[in-house]
Image (tube, rainbow, N blue to C red):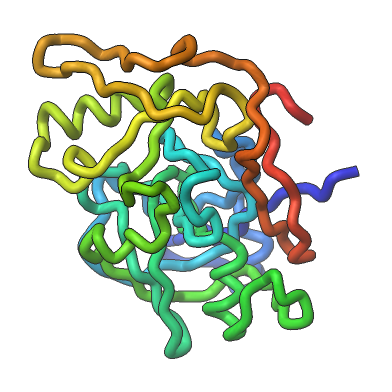
């Protein structure tokens, strides 16, 4: 049986809290859109502030609400936060204990401020979770973050062009918004559309598609194979680092157990 995926956070409370209630007891689990269980901290907002403090919790299953392809980015450097994802504010630096990591913020949580377990453990202990002898499970810790220049996340992108890879079938609304309404944004100037259907890269074809002419009202990319094909894709695996074991597990695609 596969280990159950958890993402842990703590509710932010205002007013008086009974002293007998512990942090673990007040955590309020809610299902996230990406299929994980997360604990809402009640601090969701429309846009991410430039910098601030957060209660930081681990996340161990890659996903992207805007269609970024996990097989073409470093999935161990990801942030899953409740704030909306913009065309310029998706690269962040998180710091704790004298250590810092740079992360791509390409998915939303239901309320928690999660980051990839691999680097969450690094911030807490100084060792990545894949070095299993140093895993230190906990309910989280208070960390600091700041939004940084998107070019600082270039090293997390694995495409030959250095452009951020999106699913041509599922990310078109996000991309067209950046291209039409924020044409000078980093995403509008640095994206690629691929004919891969899901963010876990299990379906479709490993090919770059032609960007539609958004200004002329077109919103469908042109690909060598059928756009949005759900043919099985091999050789583009995404590997998750599981909490709390540190084991690596291949990410499952749509409809896979």
- Frontmost residue, 163 versus 28: 163
Q: Going by the picture, which residue comes out furthest to the right? A: 1
Q: Residue at x 56, y 38 (%)?
A: 32
Q: Residue at x 47, y 56 (%)?
A: 78
Residue 256, by quadrant, is top right
Residue 34: percent from the left, percent from the top?
57, 36
Residue 129: percent from the left, percent from the top?
67, 71
Q: Going by the picture, which residue comes out furthest to the bottom? A: 98
Residue 138, by quadrant, is bottom right
- Frontmost residue, 147 versus 227: 227
Residue 62 lies left or right of residue 90; in this view the side is right
Q: Residue at x 74, y 65 (%)?
A: 246
Residue 115: percent from the left, percent from the top?
51, 60
Give the quadrant of the C terminus: top right
199 lies above or below 9: above
Q: Residue at x 21, y 63 (%)?
A: 149
- Frontmost residue, 182 versus 32: 182
Residue 228 lies left or right of residue 58; in this view the side is left
184 lies above or below 118: above
- Frontmost residue, 179 versus 237: 237
The number of numbered badges drawn on the structure is 0
Residue 106: percent from the left, percent from the top?
40, 46
Give the quadrant of the N terminus: top right
């Amino acid at each position: 049986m596969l280990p159950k995926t958890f993402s842990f956070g703590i509710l932010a409370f205002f007013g008086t809290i009974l002293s007998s209630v512990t942090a673990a007891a007040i955590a309020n689990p809610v299902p996230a859109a990406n299929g994980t269980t997360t604990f809402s901290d009640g601090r969701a907002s429309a846009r991410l502030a430039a910098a601030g403090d957060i209660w930081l919790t681990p996340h161990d299953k890659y996903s992207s609400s805007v269609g970024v392809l996990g097989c073409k980015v470093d999935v161990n450097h990801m942030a899953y936060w409740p704030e909306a994802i913009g065309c310029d504010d998706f690269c962040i630096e998180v710091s704790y204990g004298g250590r810092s990591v740079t992360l791509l913020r390409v998915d939303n949580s239901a309320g928690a401020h999660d980051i990839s377990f691999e680097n969450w453990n690094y911030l807490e202990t100084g060792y990545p979770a894949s070095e299993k002898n140093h895993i230190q499970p906990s309910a989280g810790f208070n960390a600091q973050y700041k939004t940084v220049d998107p070019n600082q996340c270039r090293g997390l992108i694995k495409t030959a062009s250095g452009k951020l890879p999106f699913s041509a079938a599922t990310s078109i609304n996000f991309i067209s918004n950046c291209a039409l309404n924020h044409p000078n944004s980093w995403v509008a100037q640095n994206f690629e559309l691929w004919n891969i259907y899901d963010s876990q890269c299990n379906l479709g074809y490993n090919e770059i598609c032609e960007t539609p002419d958004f200004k002329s009202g077109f919103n469908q990319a042109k690909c060598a194979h059928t756009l949005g094909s759900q043919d099985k894709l091999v050789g583009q695996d995404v590997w998750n680092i599981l909490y709390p074991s540190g084991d690596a597990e291949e990410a499952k695609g749509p409809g896979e157990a």
